[in-house]
Amino acid sequence: MFKLIRLERGCRLPTIRLFKMKQQQLRFDGRVVIVTGAGAGLGRAYALLFGSRGASVVVNDLGGSRDGDGKSTKAADSVVAEIRARGGKAVPDYNSVVDGEKLVQTALENFGRIDVVVNNAGILRDKSFARISDQDWDLVHNVHLKGAFKVTQAAWPHMKKQNYGRIIMTSSNSGLYGNFGQANYSAAKMGLVGLANTLAIEGRKNNIYTNVIVPTAASRLTEDILPPDFFAELRPELIAPVVVWLCHESCEDNGAIIESAAGWATKCHLVRGAGTPLRVRITDNVAPEDVQNQWNKVTDMSRAQRHESIEEVSSTLLGILEDMKSGGTSSSSSGEVESVFEFRSKDSIIYNIGIGANVQNPSELKFLYENHEDFAVLPSYAIIPGQMAFFESDLVQNAVPGKSVDLSQILHGEQYIELLKPFPTSGVLTSTARVSDVMDKGKGAVILCDAETYDESGEKIAVSQMSVFAVGAGGFGGKRTSDKAISTVDPPSRSPDASISEKTNPNQAAIYRLSGDFNPLHIDPSFAAISGYSTPILHGLCSLGYAVRHVLAQYADYDPARCKSIKTRFAKPVYPGQTLKTDMWRDGNRIFFRTSVVENNSIVLTGGFMDLTEVTAASKVVLKAAAADESLPSDAVFTGMQERIDSDKEVCKKINAVFVYNITKDKNVVATWTCDLKQGKVYKGLPVGGAKADTTLTVDDEDMIDIALGKLNPQTAFMKGKLKIKGNIMLAQKLKALQTAAPKL
């Protein structure tokens, strides 16, 4: 079932104008524009605005009444005079739009080219359907539909030759929804939508974009139809900026239906419901009773989707037919597959090891020991069940219209995961997977793979989106962008707030693949060589797992329950054994991250972010340390450090590193100190002046005192979890002489 919907509620155009005041003015210098029906109303508003922005305008108008009777040059001449009086360029044209080649010839003779055609001319011959004569029908269709066809067709070869063109078709709410007494007008207006859809496809390769405007404006066609108060608010000047923007070279919309009225605009779409099979097997017949029984599903629009091309629609139908051939077992009628994912605590541990969790870090023991009181799996594991659903199906292979995708030519482009509750460490999960959109990138296709994961009780616990690039699968005439894609976000322009570097194991890919991704590219040297790599490469999701672990360590005290969502783009490959460095920026509960390979300084994860469910302990470092007025007993330790440095400069040379101390009380960070031995300074707060921590130590205020007094051995504190260390652990061993000298204690 098809239904026409507004994609969004739209926006008031004054908001757009305020935004545009800050931008460079949109100009049409050197462009030539034909506006049909430009003697009054909307056409006049379009022509005047184009003229004021530097365009050379052909003002076309027969000067007839709204029913098409009569003829006069006065309407077009008046508008031309207005444009010229304001310093613009314009010429009149008095031809009928049915003689489209004459309008284009006027443009060529006066200005030498044609860049924009605004098909605006129209008449009304309103009568009930039973009373419409052939003449009423033909006249309306000649002006609206045939006229737009003839003018556009005459301009088309010139636009193709110059590899540029912008075309506007004018439809109507009567066309989109119907209106009593306007069967002829409604049919013509909806016909213009179909014409525009095809021109958008055929013109795309020549940079000719065709869009539809659905205006509601005060004009001679509506002056005695609409209520006076309503009529007064429908000024054509409020719609003209929308049309002018659609015709500008910087507007990339093509095939859009834009409705506008009274300083408001929105986009309309044709959508199709998910539908349902009326038979189970390809050999079955369909009876009217079968249709009756399934009618509620046939007409259900709750899961309606927009399809960008006839190829997409055909592709889904082919998938349904394949389902019927297999007896309905390969996938659901909506193009979904369902997959069951069973895992145990051992699988969670293997995954955690696969993304670098290490027993040498006491804080990570809970990821490696099933009897630990806080045993947990790292949140990026939630990606795996949805990924497995795609591995077990042929959704990706059949996603591109008219083509079969070769899995050996698939590249993982981007990944998003949102956790609706903490992920379990074992159990039986069910995931539904579907291809939500396909984009044509020329040399390849981008396939959006969406999945939802449910626990044993049927509660949804995670949603994910995997973006894959199919090499060589492009060129099928599809769209280039999708409003279904979840975007990456660039980090702030300042230096990172924190960084963590960690060397991967040469066996990292061999370990990670045990979590289900058995692509030989990550283990077989000969397969890697065929793919153009010197050795097998690390899984992109493994690199992401490292980054996720680093963010949790820095900003969430290693608590997976604080992770709400994760997004990143995979930029370049990583080889097992290389060192991954994650740079991080905090902005409230959003942590931006970017990961690079230290050995060659190449960025491998970009546009990444992790949203946290609450302000984390590490976030509070900045907030509380900046706001706290009360002094802590451990403050004296850092005062003593500065005095020790001042009295013995050699200690700085021996250690030559930057340390950050997070001081806690009741497990909350209440103060942060920086000991910068490269600069010989100890101060409260995070590192400044571009300095970055080599080692970060987290310790309770009282334990810090005991370490300084020699009552608590730092190694013992570390083993008991009283002292947590991130970064270069070996450097921390050099601190003993510095932090035990505290004369003011």
Image (cartoon, rainbow, N blue to C red):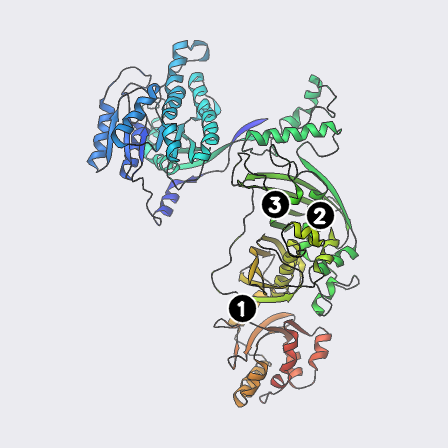
- What residue would you read off at disc 3? 468
Please tell me the numbered disc located at residue 622. 1
Residue 300 visible in the shown view:
yes
Tell me whether the residue at label 2 lies in contact with that at label 1, contact meaning CB atoms closer than 8 angstroms: no
Q: Nearer the viewer, residue 704 or 209?
A: 209
Query: Looking at the picture, which amino acid does disc 2 mark?
Result: Pro
Residue 460 visible in the shown view:
no
State how far apart marks 2 and 3 are (Cα): 17 Å
State how far apart marks 2 and 1 are (Cα): 37 Å
Please tell me the numbered disc located at residue 385. 2
Point out residue 602 in the picture as x, y percentages from the top left corner. Answer: 56, 60
Judged by depth in the image, the label closer to the viewer, 2 or 3, is 3
Quadrant position of the N terminus in the picture = top right
Tell me whether the residue at label 2 lies in contact with that at label 3, contact meaning CB atoms closer than 8 angstroms: no
Which is nearer the N-term, disc 2 or disc 1? 2
Which is nearer the N-term, disc 2 or disc 3? 2
Judged by depth in the image, the label closer to the viewer, 2 or 1, is 2
118 w.r.t. 414: above or below: above
Residue at 21% across / 37% down in the picture?
86
